[in-house]
């Protein structure tokens, strides 16, 4: 077993380099005075200039470091001097409980599974009180990097299918400017399995329209139903599977961002790694991450595409202007409950050095707009080409959203929901009226973009209706039905395993000659997409009683109806014990 190395901050060296004495200059630091500015400028200059020439899987510090191997050997690394990450298990920027003027920073140039011949690597900057631990197993650390075969298409576009053959479901389309990785082939090389952003999805393309940078017969032969490459096979590079831990720091220097890690990945290259048990897939993305035991785990999207897969195999897209927030247990790597998608905390992140990254960003993205199910919304604003507006639902399955959108900017609305195809409803003559029926507690994203040549404004009105059988904080709900000697019903939403008491009261028919042998009837509903109203699929059960107890068989929408008297009114009440 390789000996574990650890990067430790040499506090004396840091004080010498930054030359800041905290106690006598408290007021100047707290107000962003000259000493604070000099500190931040010096650290960023070191990251930007001294650490700009790193190779793959190398690190560099903005201050002297001591690399220690147990208690037997140590090596001092000077500012701007690079060091190899392969033998290191822990990277630490700054010391815990250090005065605010002892602000540390580390730069990492990570491989993150990128091909060996790529001209760029993943930029990772540890800022402030942050520690990064390599979580790879010994087997993963000792494994030889797998050969990577890149390819592109030689036609206008090429379908990606879920199975090799024209009967396979089309899941996406490739274009000539897109490069992709070949992960397998059929024995006769007629179809190639490719690396697809959704790690749970097997993806295939016809080889006749593909040009590869390797010999096709050198690609491993796989069976048509072979599963995608598991995440543990990606961990070839140091800190590709890692745990981040950040600690609060005094606010003595207001020009520093909150402790965390700033990441930027190359354009047109898919970088993959796991951070605090979350699998990240990034392409041309910039992301800030914090993992504080008190505040939680944050993934804050600043640019590009970020896909996050939880340990429960749920995939969430995080778009610029939003942040994903998990609650942490005492163990930093463990999360509790579903995540919250939130507007990006602009004020917290305004001091991130975006202009010093390899691909500089001019500014932080505008924060997304949260559409809460608790209140109605009236939102308006400007739309300009290349500056999309992000809106998102607050993770409430069973809340119906009635959406009315008007815009003079020829906009395109894109809706992305978990485990459903991307939807782009038609905005006819600048107006859209739509009902949205979410079925997942994971975030649902709405992106509104102006047409290619025209700027304008938009007005959005959103009304909500709670259709859940069981509601947190108040498990009683009633719905009124108006019938006419016939059955009348409503749509309800239930989660699998919920036990519900349904009670009908009012003008219930008992004498009609057409009365069937039921008063309550429950039907299962089918929904093709969240933008389409559910329809009755099949009758599940009927009951000749005014009160029934029912267990929801699976998560989804249900039609619940009763037989009403002529011109009568009936109320159905749901109670969840």
Image (spheres, rainbow, N blue to C red):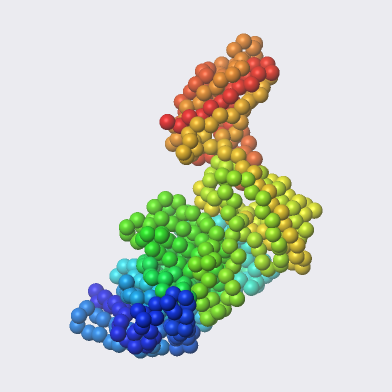
Residue 436 seen from this side: no
Residue 157, image quadrant: bottom right
Q: Of residues 254 and 234, which is closer to you in this image? A: 254
Q: Position of residue 512 (x, y in %)?
A: 64, 12
**Residue at (58, 62) in percent of width and height:** 367
**Residue at (52, 57) in percent of width and height:** 342
- Which of the image's four quarters has the N terminus? bottom left
Q: Position of residue 203 (x, y in %)?
A: 54, 60
Residue 448 seen from this side: yes
- Which of the image's four quarters has the C terminus? top left
**Residue at (60, 76) in percent of width and height:** 362
Q: Of residues 412 and 194, which is closer to you in this image? A: 412
On the picture, is 286 further left or further right than 434? left
How many badges with numbers are in the image?
A: 0
The image shows residue 273, relative to residue 540, as above or below, that is below
Q: Of residues 424 and 29, which is closer to you in this image? A: 29
Q: Of residues 209 and 437, which is closer to you in this image? A: 437
On the picture, is 236 further left or further right than 12? right
Residue 482, image quadrant: top right
Residue 526, image quadrant: top right
Q: Position of residue 204 (x, y in %)?
A: 55, 62
**Residue at (68, 16) in percent of width and height:** 566
Q: Position of residue 213 (x, y in %)?
A: 54, 77
The image shows residue 66, relative to residue 130, as above or below, that is below
Residue reaching furthest to the left? 72
């Amino acid at each position: 077993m390789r000996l574990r190395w650890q990067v430790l901050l040499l506090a004396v060296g840091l004080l010498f380099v930054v030359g800041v004495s905290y106690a006598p200059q408290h007021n100047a630091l707290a107000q962003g005075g000259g000493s604070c500015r000099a500190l931040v400028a010096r650290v960023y200059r070191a990251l930007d200039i001294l650490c700009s020439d790193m190779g793959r899987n190398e690190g560099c510090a903005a201050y002297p470091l001591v690399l220690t191997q147990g208690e037997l050997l140590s090596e001092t690394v000077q500012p701007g001097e690079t060091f190899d990450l392969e033998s290191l298990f822990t990277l630490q920027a700054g010391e815990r409980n250090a005065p605010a003027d002892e602000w540390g920073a580390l730069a990492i140039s990570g491989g993150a599974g990128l091909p060996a011949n790529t001209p760029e690597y993943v930029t990772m900057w540890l800022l402030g009180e942050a520690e990064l631990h390599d979580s790879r197993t010994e087997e993963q650390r000792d494994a030889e990097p797998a050969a990577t075969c890149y390819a592109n298409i030689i036609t206008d576009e090429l379908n990606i299918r879920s199975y090799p053959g024209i009967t396979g479901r089309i899941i996406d389309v490739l274009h000539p400017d897109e490069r992709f990785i070949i992960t397998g082939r059929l024995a006769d090389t007629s179809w190639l399995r490719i690396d697809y952003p959704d790690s749970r999805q097997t993806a295939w393309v016809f080889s006749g329209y593909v040009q590869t940078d390797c010999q096709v017969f050198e690609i491993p032969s796989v069976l048509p139903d072979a599963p995608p490459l598991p995440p543990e096979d990606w961990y070839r590079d140091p800190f590709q599977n890692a745990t981040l831990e950040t600690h609060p720091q005094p606010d003595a220097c207001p020009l520093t961002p909150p402790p965390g890690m700033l990441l930027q990945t190359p354009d047109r290259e898919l970088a993959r790694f796991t951070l605090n048990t979350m699998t990240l897939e990034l392409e041309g993305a910039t992301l800030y991450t914090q993992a504080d035991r008190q505040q939680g785990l944050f993934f804050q999207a600043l640019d590009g595409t970020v896909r996050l897969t939880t340990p429960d195999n749920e995939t969430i897209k995080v778009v610029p202007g939003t942040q994903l927030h998990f609650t942490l247990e005492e163990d930093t790597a463990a999360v509790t409950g579903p995540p919250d998608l939130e507007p990006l905390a602009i004020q917290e992140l305004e001091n991130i050095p975006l202009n010093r990254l390899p691909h500089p960003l001019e500014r932080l993205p505008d924060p997304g707009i949260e559409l809460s199910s608790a209140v109605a919304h009236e939102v308006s604003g400007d739309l300009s080409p290349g500056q999309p507006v992000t809106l998102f639902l607050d993770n409430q399955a069973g809340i119906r959203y009635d959406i009315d959108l008007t815009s003079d900017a020829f906009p395109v609305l894109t809706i992305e929901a978990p485990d459903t195809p991307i939807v782009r409803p038609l905005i006819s003559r600048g107006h859209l009226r739509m009902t949205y029926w979410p079925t997942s507690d994971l975030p649902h994203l709405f992106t509104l973009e102006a047409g290619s040549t025209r700027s304008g404004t938009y007005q959005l009105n959103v009304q909500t209706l709670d259709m859940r059988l069981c509601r947190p904080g108040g498990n009683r709900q009633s719905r009124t039905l108006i019938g006419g000697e016939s059955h009348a019903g409503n749509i309800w939403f239930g989660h699998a395993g919920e036990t519900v008491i349904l009670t009908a009261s009012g003008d219930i028919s008992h004498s009609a000659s057409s009365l069937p042998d039921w008063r309550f009837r429950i039907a299962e509903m089918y929904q093709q997409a969240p933008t389409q109203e559910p329809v009755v699929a099949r009758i599940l059960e009927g009951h000749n009683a005014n009160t029934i107890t029912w267990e929801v068989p699976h998560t989804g929408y249900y039609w619940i109806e009763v037989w009403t008297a002529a011109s009568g009114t009936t109320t159905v009440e749901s109670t969840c014990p």
